[in-house]
Image (tube, rainbow, N blue to C red):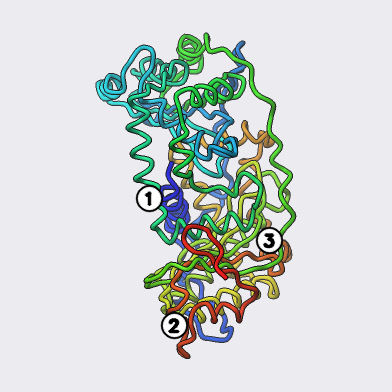
Amino acid sequence: MTAKSRRAIFFLVILLAALAAAVPAFPQAQHGAELSKVTRLNHAPVSNEILQVHLPKPVVTKLPNGLTVLVIEQHKLPTANFVLWIEGGDMSDPKDTPGLASFTAEMLREGTTHRTSAQLAADVDNIGASLSTSSGFGSTNSAVAASGLAPSAGQILELMSDVVLNATFPPDELEKYKQRQLSQLEQERAEPSALAEEKFHQALYRDFPAAVTLPTPESIQATTPERLKEFHARYYVPGNAILGVVGDVKPDEILALIRKSFGDWKGQPPPKPDWSHLPPAASAKIYLVDRPDSVQTNIVAGDYGARRGDPDYIALTVMNRVLGGGPQARLFLNLREAHGYTYGAYSGVGDDKYREPWVANTEVRNAVTDGSLEQLMLEFKRIRDEKVPEPELDEARHAIVSSFALSLEQQQQLLFRWMLVQSYGLPLDYWDRYPGQVAQTGADAVQAAARKYVDLDHLQVVCVGDAKQPGNDQKQPIRQVLEKYGSVEVYDTNGKREE
């Protein structure tokens, strides 16, 4: 998965969650400036029955070779969805080859001992199925996903097992892939959002693997079939994987097909990585990536977030919903509705096995860089210093739970949540308790989460824009404007620090 795809998916998920919740904008109290005139008509349409969500439980089986299998029966549609998670994403890349996990995953479909790339694509099309392989920077997993009609389940599984077990990484296909990657990397490095993400992760994570968000031309050129095979042999083993199935299937029948396709898979899993040791939080700093001729400033600000299993993760989720979790949240209402600085302003939290960032993001006109940063900092301070009013907090809680309940209508989402439970070692009743825990999250817990994670003493802020352009009404250059908010370091678009 490319950095551009990850960013698009991240913000699309935020927006879809907000729209699914059907939450009207809540009128904000005045705080330095009057916010949106939009009025709240009523609560989100959520009944007590929806708030008491109970997920159908999977049948969990461990095959003799170590592969863990989850099967969820759901007979609403005559389809079957499969996902294989391999614990070995780009967080496991060798330091000298960033992107190797992604390269390995994407090259799985380019040829096996039984099929060429063209033959594989034809076989997938002939049964009306889909087959995708991916990994991504910041991810601890690689994934193989497939779906199709339930009667074709055996054929789908055979295709999945062929790319997972029998990939050959043919040199001619690899050369074509490398040329595509070099072209794509050049395009991504021209995008302000990619530059902002890169510098933010470098500032936050430093020598931790999550600091890397893009491959390099050198890492692409250095990729060989042998290196791909080494990565594949180390991580693509059954004891290092979870296979999930959801759809119009019977556990006994689908398990028999899985054993047929994956039962001969062999290999010993590598040692489990420890993702808990992050660099100490760095002192607050502002980084300016000087991108000449930019007509806008991309602003990213944040700090370490929480892991899904951490005790205050749910409180952080509720806090984030109030602050920047959609078009009804404070950042959007302030920067867009009240001030007209931007088309959108959001924040989000991750939930991987390490502490992904809590991060806020917006893109603004050059001339309002100063005002935008002022309002961002105002909202950060406000969520820390003032308890969220109960009606606003209640809206956020209802929105999270209703969005969660609606998401379970999608088979892929249902499977994804159970894969998280299995992969992260969460309690089996985690999702049964989740709506109630959200509903019981009070203003004190939300404020405690804000004070912990919206940490102004360690906030990392990245701005990508033209340093010489006026950043406010006084025509002060953006570089000078940023100095009002803290210590500033300036870099060019290649990552070289400027004096």
- Give the image location of residue 350, x and y in percent: 58, 50
Side of 381 relative to 72 (left or right) = right
- Which of 497 and 350 lies nearest the eye of the viewer? 497
Neighbours of disc 1 within 10 Å: few (<14), some (14-19), many (20+): few
Q: Secondary structure at mark 2?
A: loop
The residue located at (34%, 29%) in the rendering is: 130
Q: Residue furthest front?
A: 499
Q: Secondary structure at mark 1?
A: helix
The residue located at (64%, 68%) in the rendering is: 285
Give, as a three-letter code, the residue at label 3: Tyr
Which corner quadrant holds the C terminus? bottom right
Instruction: Return the residue at label 2.
Output: 470
Which corner quadrant holds the N terminus? top left
Residue 159 seen:
yes
Q: Say whether disc 1 or disc 2 marks the residue closer to the N-terminus.
A: 1
Instruction: Return the residue at label 3.
Output: 453
- Which of 242 and 209 lies nearest the eye of the viewer? 209
- Give the image location of residue 4, x and y in percent: 41, 50
- Which of 129 and 160 lies nearest the eye of the viewer? 160
- Give the image location of residue 194, x and y in percent: 45, 56
Give, as a three-letter code, the residue at label 1: Glu
Instruction: Give the Cα distance between marks 3 and 1.
Output: 34 Å
Seen in the picture, residue 140 relative to 46 is either above or below; the reply is above
Instruction: Give the Cα distance between marks 2 and 3.
Output: 32 Å
Q: Residue furthest bottom?
A: 474
The residue located at (59%, 46%) in the rendering is: 52
Q: Dots 3 and 1: beta carbons under 8 Å?
A: no
- Give the image location of residue 384, x and y in percent: 69, 71
Instruction: Return the residue at label 1.
Output: 186
Q: Secondary structure at mark 3?
A: helix
